[in-house]
Image (cartoon, rainbow, N blue to C red):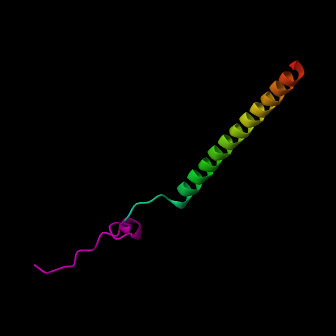
Amino acid sequence: MPLTIKPRNPVALSPLLRKGGVHCKSNSAIRQSRRVSLAQDLRDWQFELDFERKLNSGVAKNSDAVDSSE
């Protein structure tokens, strides 16, 4: 029985299958999460700004009413 070398499986040697190590988010996932976070921060900031404007305009109206009643 002659010894023959068995050919290797080319799929098992694929460089894509050899990516081991730490799993982390891809750059596009990081970019997307930053974009979503920025949009949320902007929405919160805008809500607070609108709330302060409404609050200040209400205070101004109430102070005018107090001044006129005195």
Was residue 6 drawn as part of the magenta stretch in this picture?
A: yes
Q: In terms of image quadrants, where is residue 24?
A: bottom left
Would you say the magenta stretch is mainly helix, strand or loop? loop
Q: How many marks?
A: 0
Q: In terms of image quadrants, where is residue 67?
A: top right
Q: Which quarter of the rendered picture does the N terminus lie within?
A: bottom left
Highlighted range, magenta: 1-21
Is residue 68 rendered to the left or right of residue 52? right
Residue furthest to the left in view is: 1
Q: Position of residue 17 (x, y in %)?
A: 37, 65
Was residue 25 drawn as part of the magenta stretch in this picture?
A: no
Judging depth in this view, the residue of 41 and 17 nearest the camera is 41
Q: Which quarter of the rendered picture does the C terminus lie within?
A: top right
Q: Position of residue 43 (x, y in %)?
A: 67, 41
Q: Position of residue 59 (x, y in %)?
A: 78, 29
Is residue 35 rendered to the left or right of residue 61? left
Judging depth in this view, the residue of 61 and 36 nearest the camera is 61
Residue furthest to the right in view is: 68
Q: Is residue 14 above or below residue 28?
A: below
Judging depth in this view, the residue of 65 and 37 nearest the camera is 65
Judging depth in this view, the residue of 45 and 66 nearest the camera is 66
